[in-house]
Amino acid sequence: VQLQASGGGLVQAGGSLRLSCAASRRPVTDLAMAWFRRAPGNEREFVSAISRSGGYILNADFVKGRFTISRDIALNTIYLQMNDLKPEDTAVYYCAADQNRVNHAAYSRSVDYEYWGQGTQVTVSS
């Protein structure tokens, strides 16, 4: 599985961005997928995850309705719509995937994912 993340950029506080993660070699319906992020000097942290079935979504507490994970089966891509961005959301965002997961569960631990994209930088100015 190969993952290609894109969509990061520089945005002012309160603004929005949509990140994309295109998967290749396996359909997203075979994959549990997620977004993680790492801010400078911090550990990588979980953001949001979606199950293989697409019917189960798990979010970190700090998302608080601001971020929405979704997927497009036809494009074999998942998305992270981020609204009301804050300076503390500044980080490199990574998408992750694993093919050895049950259909109806979403996972928040980085060790649950075998495949990782290259990351896309999100910078939120105050």
Image: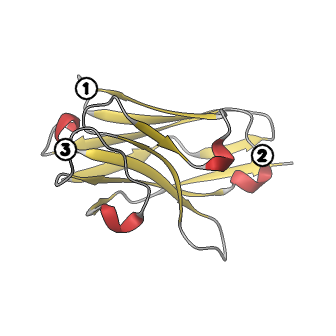
As drawn, the label of residue 86 is: 2
Q: Could you say where residue 80 lies in the image, as x and y percent from the top left?
A: 50, 37
The amino acid on which the numbered mark 2 sits, given as a three-letter code, is Lys
Q: Secondary structure at mark 3?
A: strand
Asked whether 98 or 57 is in front, the reply is: 57
Residue 60 percent coordinates (x, y): 58, 49
Q: Quadrant of residue 96?
A: bottom left
Reading the chain from its start, which is encountered first: label 1 or label 2?
Answer: 1
Q: Residue at x 77, y 46 (%)?
A: 86
Task: Read off the residue under disc 3.
Answer: 24
Q: In the rendering, at what x and y percent does residue 59 appear?
A: 53, 44
Pointer 1 and pointer 2: residues touching (CB < 8 Å)?
Answer: no
Residue 73, label in figure: 1
Q: CA distance from mark 1 to mark 2?
A: 30 Å
Amino acid on which the number 1 mark rests in the picture: Ile
The image's colour scheme reads secondary structure
Task: Determine which of the numbered discs, if any, sits on residue 29 in the image.
Answer: none
Callout 3 amino acid:
Ser
